Amino acid sequence: MASVDTNVLLRLVLDDDAAQVRRAESFLKREGPLWISNVVLVETCWVLLTGYKWPKSDVISALRSLQDSADFIFQASQAVRSAIDFYETTKADFADCLALEVARAEGQLPLGTFDRASSKLPGTTVLY
């Protein structure tokens, strides 16, 4: 199974550069479904939020759309699904939600954190 980096995934999500989008879509058609690593997923969220100033709700919609698509396979897909659910209902950022859910899936809890927003998630231990 082929995978994509953040730049390719962004072209597919944003549809903002005709030439690159065409190449990304061709790769998807030829090699799909495409595997998306947790690192690429976190970077993609960060770029959409900070670089493109997308509202959190739009990022969540994009994540759900990607996950529901037959064109993509996520690393730790159940952890990603749970992380999206937490991200939607908390002030914690997506990276923290995903780190917690991957740790939970691996049986590696509690997750120690200094982050106040993340510390409200079940399975974390705040280190004051």
Image (tube, rainbow, N blue to C red):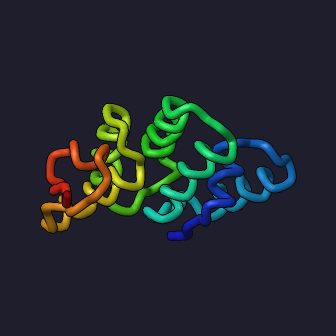
The spot of residue 79 in percent (x, y) is: 29, 54
Q: Residue at x 32, y 35 (%)?
A: 90
Q: Quadrant of residue 6?
A: bottom right
In the displayed structure, would residue 78 be above or below residue 91? Answer: below
Q: Residue at x 36, y 37 (%)?
A: 91
In-front residue for pair 11/60: 60
Q: Residue at x 69, y 61 (%)?
A: 27
In-front residue for pair 13/72: 13
Q: Quadrant of the C terminus?
A: bottom left
Q: Residue at x 55, y 69 (%)?
A: 2
In the displayed structure, would residue 4 be above or below residue 62? Answer: below
Q: Quadrant of residue 53?
A: top right
Q: Residue furthest front?
A: 128
The spot of residue 9 in percent (x, y) is: 62, 55
Q: Is residue 106 left or right of residue 15?
A: left
The spot of residue 104 in percent (x, y) is: 18, 59
Q: How many numbered markers are drawn? A: 0
